[in-house]
Structure formats: structure tokens, C-alpha cells
Image (tube, helix red, strand yellow):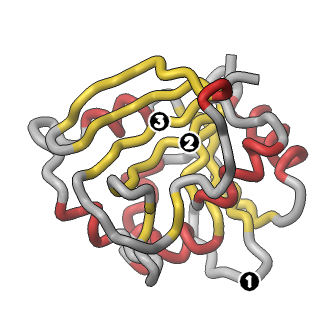
Amino acid sequence: MTLTQYYTATTLDGFIADEHQSLDWLFDVDRGENAGSAFTEFFAGVGAMAMGATTYEWALEHDAGESWAKWYGETPCWVFTHRDLPVVPGVRLEFVQGDVAPVHAAMAAAAGDQNIWLMGGGDLVGQFADQGLLDEILVGIAPVTLGAGAPLLPRRLGASQLELVGLDRQGQFARLTYRVRR
């Protein structure tokens, strides 16, 4: 069964990016031994992914265009945007806007028996949650506080909607997995 998963990292005070949309804080945190193993294991199960325009632009500004194939292989990606954005040559990208439900259906078809990764941002993920299309939140909590920035998930999901199903540690990150109940 295909799961729609929000795999991300957040600060202790609940921000995924600072007020300037920077993720620099993330790269200062010790990931411990086998630093990329959690992501590698997660991504092995991903058959399609989506992100917002801000996340896409950040990736392009940080050499993802040149490294996209190394990081994401041939995995198709949907970018939600209301503006024209540069295309990464040779990458399976689709620029979309509007309701997430029909895009989710296309992503699920492309993913086959693999999962869908909602990379971010938090508001985009919230739109999937609003429509009952979010199955899991996999979050690494870093020992950093920013005081302001882009929130992890700017929606109210109560304790009755989230079930803790996994707890782990990777270096200085506390890794939590929540199942979203419907």
C-alpha cells in the first residue's frame, strides 16, 4: 500500500526553515555515525515526491540542479507553484498548482507500490492533511531553536489524530514517526 509521508527535520521550537527560508541550521547538527543512513533507507521506498516552490528554489540554489540525479535518481517530482521556475534538465518534473487531490492521484499512480514523499513546505503538507491524504509524519527534531521561521506544519492536528509508532535517535536528532489517524 502506498503511503504519503512527510519526511522532514525541524528545530526544537518547530521550524523547518528560518525567517529567511534558510536551512543552514540543519547542517550544523551532528547526525552521528552513518549520517545519511536514515534518509537512504527512507528514500529507497519513495516512488514519487512533491515540494513547494520555496523548497524547490532552495534546492536549486544549493546545487541540487547538478546533484539532483545523485540525490533523487529518476524519481518523478511535482512542484507546486504559481510562478515560472527554472527546469532542471533531464529531471522528471511537473509544475502544478491548485487542489492537491488530483495531483496526489497522479503521484500515487506514478509511485506504484512505493511511497509518496511530501518534502515541504509545511503549508503544502497541510493541504494534503486537510484532504485526508497524509499518512505519516517522519520528523527529525534537532537541538536548535530559531524563534521564528517556517513552521513544521501550520495546521492543528490533535493527539487523537496522531499515533506515535516509531522513536529513534540519530546523532543529535530525535527521530519520531507518527501515523495520521483518519
Q: Quarter of the image holding residue 87?
A: bottom right
> Residue visible at 76% across and 82% down?
83
Residue 23 marker: none
Q: Residue furthest front?
A: 159
The N terminus lies in quadrant: top right
SS assignment at label 1: loop
Q: How far is the residue under mark 2 from the one under mark 1?
A: 25 Å
**Residue that badge 3 annotates:** 138
Q: Dot 1, how many residues are within 10 Å of its Cα: few (below 14), some (14-19), or many (20+)?
A: few
Residue 6 marker: 2
> Residue visible at 35% across and 39% down?
39
Q: Is residue 60 left or right of residue 29?
A: right
**Residue that badge 1 annotates:** 84
Q: Position of residue 175 (x, y in %)?
A: 33, 34
The C terminus lies in quadrant: top right
Q: Position of residue 66 (x, y in %)?
A: 40, 70
